[in-house]
Image: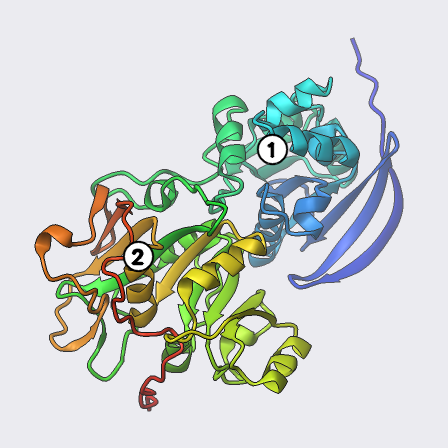
Amino acid sequence: MSVTRIAPSEIARLTLPTPFGEWQTSGFEWEGSVHLCMWRGEIGDGEDVLVRLHSECLTGDALGSLRCDCGIQLRQAFRVIAAEGRGIVVYSTGHEGRGIGLADKLRAYMLQDDGLDTLEANEHLGFPADGRTFADATECLRAMGVRSVRLLSNNPNKARALNDGGVRVLGVVGLPTSAHARNRRYLTTKQTRMHHAAPMGFPLVDGVAPPVEIGSLLGVVRPSAARPYVAVKYAQSIDGRIATANGDSRWISGEEERRIAHALRASCDAVVVGIGTILNDDPQLTVRMVPGASPIRVVLDSMLRIPDDARVLADDAATTIVTTDASPTERRRELRRRGISIVLVPAGRDGVDPVKAFGALRATGIQSLLVEGGGRVITSVLSHALADRLIVGVAPRVLGSGTDAVRDLGVTEVSRALRVEGWSVHLAGEDVLLAGDVASVGPIRAGARVARPGAPVRRRASRP
């Protein structure tokens, strides 16, 4: 028996410039929805075309929501196809919330906040778990002369729909992303209940397997009302140094360990460093080595000594500076005019008080913090009992004298040392990754002298 096909109607054809280059674009109407077919290169005979079927997601694609992986997958697909030089992104409207529309997707989010998973929420509202058929996108590809594809997707239903619709799937190329603490449950549900292929990558295991999915490193994110969940992460030599005697720290760890550090950034709402790290290393603090969202960059800077050309002030990610009321008022105004958020805490004996700073950040909605350094900030966070998780990369190097990862904590008896429990150990290339929960204790000693995050530091001589 013959099957009646509904042919999509082409309503526009144009060139669309994007951050990923120019894309030829055709707009198709199909049963009340619009589909954008954006392509690079010549489609030619329509065989072996690299294709991404992408469902509309206003919150993820346009607003950068961290509740899903949609926006990151879309940008990754553009990058991959642009690099190959030939392929198509099909962007399908009418697919919001797996076919339930924007308003009901927002209602489903409320149900998820109350404990339902993403499938249960849709079903509770009277919808199927996934109302999409992908027949619409398949017909658009057929209208463009596509006959066979390599599909960029983790979703087996997309491959099945293409094959059923007459477009052969020669292979499936996964699009895993680094999970964020806010979307980990969503991605886990897609993998376990919808059978998506490793949407977070493959998990860390003990031994020599390459680490990708870093949930076991980050631990269970449980922010309190008073402060965010805090993970302290640093890389050190075997003898406990994070830099040489003259301040050089690039690179103590290998590329694989640094890739994990980027995945950890992508998992957290914000990454924190002190002004000393900015002055010494001028880090960018974005996510570049894995597909993932860059966190809010937080700098603890009691007197706003941050240089105007510091890389964390670039517009490639949001930046917040926590400073004190002793900092220059006009300097605060200058930074705000540049789009930098300023969080003000009362000046204390030690400059930026991390307890007050983290409390203020929690009040802005930040739930998870990754503390990356430097040594003063790490020591201050540990001394004030603010760390929930400790993650240490140990590189097979011996530096001798240099900068300690953790400085004086005022511990005079081994029995009073900071305890880390539930350790896990993994390999990342030549480096060893250790992660564990910091035992719940109060400040290590009352009135302990802690190096302040905003204290002056010796600037390292520039490299030739």
Q: Residue at x 46, y 40 (%)?
A: 200
Apparent side of residue 75 relative to residue 175 in the rendered image (left or right): right
Against 241, is 48 above or below?
above
Secondary structure at numbered mark 2: helix
Q: Are marks 2 and 1 in contact (CB under 8 Å)?
A: no
Which numbered circle lies on residue 257?
2
Where residue 347 sits in the image (x, y, percent)?
47, 75
Against 214, is 99 above or below?
above
Under mark 2, the amino acid is Glu
Under mark 1, the amino acid is Asp
Mark pair 2, 1: CA separation: 34 Å
Q: Residue at x 34, y 48 (%)?
A: 388
Q: Nearer the viewer, mark 2 or mark 1?
A: 1
- The front one of 228 and 442 is 442
- The front one of 159 and 338 is 338
Q: Residue at x 67, y 24 (%)?
A: 122
How many marks overall? 2
Q: Which residue is mark 1?
A: 113
Whether residue 89 is visible: no
Q: Quadrant of the C terminus?
A: bottom left
Whether residue 148 is visible: yes
Where residue 191 sits in the image (x, y, percent)?
49, 29
Q: Residues within 10 Å of mark 1 (few under 14, many from 20)?
A: few
